[in-house]
Each structure stands twice: as C-alpha cells, then as structure tokens.
Image: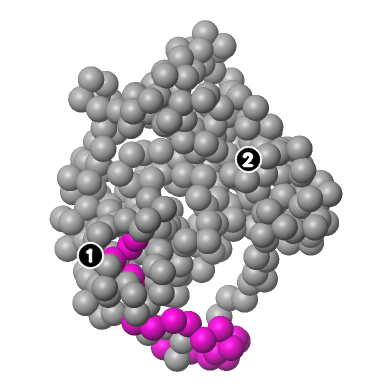
Amino acid sequence: MAEYDLLDVDTDNDEYAKSTCAEFQDRNFRRHCILAQYLKKSDANYVLAMDGDMAVVNPHHCIEDYINSNASLIFYERFHTFEITASSFIVKNDAYGIEFLMDWARYSRRVPRVSWANSDNGALLSLLLEKRLVSSHERAMCTRLWQHANTVDNYMKYIQCAYIFLGSKRNDLSEQIKILRRGHGWGRDGWTSDGKWCDHDFLMHAIKAVDYSSLQKIDSPTLNDGHAVDKFLPFLQPFNLSECKPGRAYNDTYHMKPELHVPCDELRTRLKGRLIVPQTVLLPYLDDSDLDCWPSCEKLK
C-alpha cells in the first residue's frame, strides 16, 4: 500500500504563501509560486499537484504508475479538448521543475483580458511553446488567437495553433517535460463519461456537490455560482477520514456506486463523440481515432 503526505494549502490565507508569493494576485497563478516555494523546503522527490475537486475513484493505482524518472514535469491532455490541463500535474523537486513553476506564475502578467483566455491553462500552452523553442514569429501567430479568444471556438483554434507547432510528437516535448496523451494520464473530467469509470481510471476531475443529500435534489446541472455540479458523484457517502490509514483495506473506506463502474470497452463507446474541435482547423492527430487503441495506445510504441 502506497503512503503519501498530503499538503492542503489555502492559497489565500497560508502564511508562508503570503510571505513568498504575495506579488501574484491571481490565485490560479499564485498556487504555482506557492508550490515552488514549498518544494524548496521539502525533501519530497515528487509532488502530485491537483485541484480540490479531484478525487480517487480507483484506489488500485498509485502515483508512481505515471512518473517518468527522466522528466521534471509530467502533464496530461484533457479528454475532450486536447488542452494540457493545469488542474493536476506531477513535478520533480529539482531546479528545472521549480523554475518552470515560477515561470508559469510570472505568466499571470501576460494573460489576455478576454473571456476565454482560460487563465493558467491557456498560459501553460504558451509557456510550453517557449520551452519547445518555437520561433517568436510562430508563437506570435498563436498568441494573436489567444488574445482574441472571446469564444470557446476561438480558444480551441489557439490550442490547435499551438499543437501545429508542437507537432505530433508533442507527448515527448523534451527530456524534462512529458505530456501524457489524452486518456493515459491519471485524471479525467468525470462528465466526459457521465460519471462512469473503468479499471484504467485513477482520479476524476470536476467532482463537485453541495453535499450528498442535496445532490440528489438538484435539477439544474449548475449551481448558482455557475460551476458545474457532477450529478454522477461516484461515492455513496462521505469519507470518514479517520478510517483512511495504513493497514485498512480500501473496501472499508471506499463506498462506491456499483453502477458507475463499467468495462473499459463500454467506456470507450461512451467517450466517443465527446471531443470538441473546431471544424475550420483539422489536424490528423487530434481526432477520436486514438480511442481505437485507448487505453493502451502508449503500449504500441
């Protein structure tokens, strides 16, 4: 049984964060600075960073399953957009990893003031273009799309522009940066499969609920604040954290809805058609054909 240290940081009120990262007003970027500062004083070899709305649905996996020892940073692509997610990533406690986080935080000063700039997600793609040493002219082509991303379709064009210059070998971006192809990372947005998961899955993103009782009464797919509610919450009841300790079998602490656990072949069918791509820009390696080999595409290399 793997054992991990959990560090839960309040990015607004953490005293150490206030003293080291106060210059970053946007909390989405400030969190990257905070992680870098905590890494500097940590003896951990790796850190898995993740949003508060991510949850383990399948405890048969370990974080180590996704670590590439040669990489300082490991990301994965979102299933429905090919966007490289900022909601969770693995960073090695080395100089490259720490400096990357700080560069990411500093990007807060360069995010366009448009509705679909998508904060640190959009910035991550632009930063990766720089790390790939794409020419300034090519980056400018994509940046213009980013600066005018006032619709989701325009934002998707920015993503695909970046992927043109990252190339079909984007998953091996550099020795220091590894990007896991969609469906082969440790997380996935739960709504892409209506909450269903298979043995290949590990974590799910966008697991939200006001509480377990009210969840069953919600008719609208959104809360008053506009955030999506996962009506397919995979857990039958809240966790008793006092039960989560070494020596306890996961069956004692994980009370899952059995109807949401399905074979991967069935899940593949459900995931088909959830891809969002603009029809004006088509790339042969950004389509649903990779689901034909999912979830074992990486084994075909």
Q: Secondary structure at mark 1?
A: loop
Counting from the top left corner in percent of width and height, residue 144 is at 46, 14
Counting from the top left corner in percent of width and height, residue 60 is at 43, 75
Residue 150 magenta-drawn?
Answer: no
User: In this rendering, would 298 be left or right of 124?
Assistant: left
Residue labelled with disc 2: 26
Where's the C terminus, which quadrant? top left
Magenta region: which residues?
Answer: 229-251
Regarding residue 211, the answer to whether it shows in the image is yes
Near mark 2 (Cα within 10 A), the count class, few <14, some 14-19 or many ≥20, is: some
- The image quadrant of residue 116 is top left
Considering only vertical position in the picture, is 87 above or below 160?
Answer: below
Residue labelled with disc 1: 219
Q: Residue at the spot x=67%, y=66% of the render? A: 7
Q: CA distance from mark 2 to mark 1?
A: 32 Å
Q: Mark 1 belongs to which amino acid?
A: Asp
Counting from the top left corner in percent of width and height, residue 184 is at 39, 52
Q: Residue furthest top?
A: 137
The main secondary structure of the magenta stretch is loop
Q: Secondary structure at mark 2?
A: loop
Mark identifier at residue 286: none
Name which of mark 2 and mark 1 comes first in the sequence.
2
User: In this rendering, would 223 be left or right of 32?
Assistant: left
Q: Residue at the spot x=62%, y=76% of the render? A: 3
- The image quadrant of residue 257 is bottom left
Q: Mark 2 belongs to which amino acid?
A: Asp
User: In this rendering, would 269 be left or right of 232?
Assistant: left
Regarding residue 67, the answer to whether it shows in the image is no
